[in-house]
Image (spheres, grey):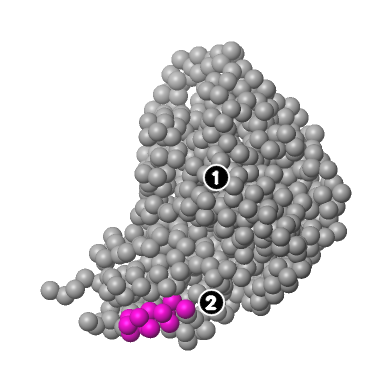
Amino acid sequence: MPKRIRILIAKPGLDGHDRGAKYVARALKDAGYEVIYTGIRQSPQAIAKTAVQEDVDFVGLSLLSGAHNELFPEVVRLIRENGGENIIVFGGGVIPDEDIPFLKEQGVEVVFTPGAPMQDIIAFIEANKERTAH
Amino acid sequence: MTRKLIEQKKKEWENSALKKVLDKNPERKECFTTNSWLEAERVALPPEMDERQWLEKIGFPGEYPYTRGVQPTMYRGRFWTMRQYAGFGTAEESNRRYKYLLEQGQTGLSVAFDLPTQIGYDSDDEHSVGEVGKVGVAIDSLRDMEILFDGIPLDKVSTSMTINAPAAVLLAFYIALAEKQGVAKEKLRGTIQNDILKEYIARGTYIFPPQPSLRLITNIFEYCADEMPNWNTISISGYHIREAGSTAVQEVAFTLADGMTYVQAALDTGLDVDRFAGRLSFFFNAHNDLLEEVAKFRAARRIWAKIMKEKFRAKNPRSMMLRFHTQTGGSTLTAQQPDNNIVRVTIQALAAVLGGTQSLHTNSKDEALGLPTEDAVRIALRTQQIVAHESGVTNSVDPLAGSYFMESLTDKIEEKVWKYLDKIEQLGGMVPAIEKGYVQKELQDAAYRYQREIESGERVLVGVNQYTIKEEGQKDILRVDPSIQQKQMENLKQLRKERDNNAVNSALQALRNGARKESVNLMPFIVQAARAYATLGEICGILREEFGEYQEAVVL
């Protein structure tokens, strides 16, 4: 039996806007994935540690405070450093279009901005789940 | 009015005229509801009430239970305070934005602080990386406050500060600044948000656990009752609860339950209710369902008046008045076709004014994309000015009163709020209800349902799931200079070198000793530390060590 896909939804930094993160976490759960949600105000270190320890396939980072350029790349770096080579990182939140190329360069595979439908997020996970091979 | 004849006639109408139309053209939906899923009747009837009941429930503005407003003349006397929440980057930049807004006719200031400031970290703290100056201005000490209000005399403006866990510290900075400007404390006008319970529920900038947090809040109530009679000591906020996805009913219910907790905490320390209750203020959201929102504000006033009079035995009418600030609904703004947001904000501003708000912030059209530009902020302010001067809704007090639908919706909201208040009381009050995750769960279920309806297309969001166009790239986004953190760090280094560190250390030690004795009011100690240029992070650091930190109850 194939392993169920595990997804960590995480809130790095000091931002408390968690409506989107919680919605995505719950909707992914309803779509049949195993989902872990960190709660707000997590350090990049704590997120990376959880991602590796929990052996997740995907990490979804949510941030609305504008600190994404600093915090998203740091989470990716720490995940890799801790042995999570195959974990796919994606992001969401209030993120200007012009920041997205930089984030992609830094290892954030895709960024979902306000109004993105849930089916896009699920389609992304389905299209990439094979790559997180164990 | 008895309705026998009306009800009989309504039946006849339903069986004849209405039936004929429905047979041919069914309505758009099986069931019509408000934005928050309250049933909307097709045609409302006159309420069943006699004159005495009318006087008790609706009555006159400026009189108990204040359904129609807290002042007898409302906007015929003076308009609401137009107060745009602003702040970003450094104190210098924010100071420029404040002066611009005052020049444009804004009548009060509202300070947005960055997240490190809101959570009691200095700009050079490891937790602050990436967040300095982003969602508001970075304030580390009295020195930053001096720059923030440079050229703005504190006896001439009223200032609202969105600050919660470290509210006592920012208030102390403000007091110390007033001393330097030569303005007496008694003359200071403004508000601190100072509402920790909704931080646990919805907003997230908590520091300490509930009990010491409630102590700090009641310390402020007591201090201001003696020293700052024109200061609003708290702004009990439903705004963020609604933004997190609650219904209108939940917004009112949870906010008033929070308010009751603060009142009880103050009474428990021996304060007399009428000594502090008149300085409590509230903060609500205004969403797009115009009639539901107006009914919400009216119901909230009526319920709070009853709570204060009957439960807490207030005698002074001012203690019973729910005075509130409104902000239009940030979560209703769309990143798609952002110009449409001007229209949404107009509807929401109308709701706030028809609902009798005391002050108003209108959001800028570009806030789903980032911080607002100066042009966008000006349009938002102009929206308020147009409502005030051109719409005509300010000519009569509570002009929607007596609308059958408005009164029935007001009653319906009131009834459902009381049910929540009873439930929260059964759970032992708001603190246990939050610790058990009950409040968060209720709110999240509503948020989830709402978003599901958008996803399914059942709920139409113009420009998002219908009437979409191919969007052009975003332009004119305000960006915060990333070198700000570096600048703040250098300033802090300089400050720590220049100030009298003995004075700082002894003020901090006195604060620590005070924190250890439950009965001590900490405000004078915090003011003393502020005067000595102790930093926000140093003051909060002492309190963190003494009080511990809150751990979120993660509810999904």
Is residue B284 found inside the magenta-colored segment of the image? no
Q: How many marks?
A: 2
Could you tell me if residue B323 is visible in this image?
no
Residue at image coords 43%, 34%: B429
User: Residue B230: percent from the left, percent from the top?
Assistant: 75, 38
Residue B235 % position (x, y): 62, 43
Residue drawn at x 56%, y 41% as measured from the top left = B517
Q: Give SS at disc 1.
A: helix
Which tag is nearer the camera, tag 2 or tag 1? 1
| Place of residue A11 in the rendered image (x, y in percent of width and height, measured from the top left) | 44, 65
Of residue B540 and residue A15, the one placed in the foreground of this image is B540
Identify which amino acid the numbered label 1 is placed on.
Arg
- Chain under disc 1: B
A133 lies left or right of B361: left
- Is residue A83 on the magenta stretch? yes
The quarter of the rendered structure image containing the C terminus of chain B is bottom left
Residue displayed at 22% across by 82% down = A134
Compared to residue B169, the image places residue B521 above or below, namely: above
Q: Residue shown at 68%/54% (left/top)?
A: B506
Q: Which residue is mark 1?
A: B516
Query: Mark 2 highlights which residue?
Result: A70
- Give the extent of the magenta segment: A74-85
Q: State whether the magenta stretch is mostly helix, strand or loop.
A: helix
Q: Quadrant of residue A131?
A: bottom left
Classify residue B214 by image quadrant. Answer: top right
Amino acid type shown at disc 2: Glu
Please say if B503 is above or below A89.
Answer: above
x and y percent of residue A73 in the render? 47, 80
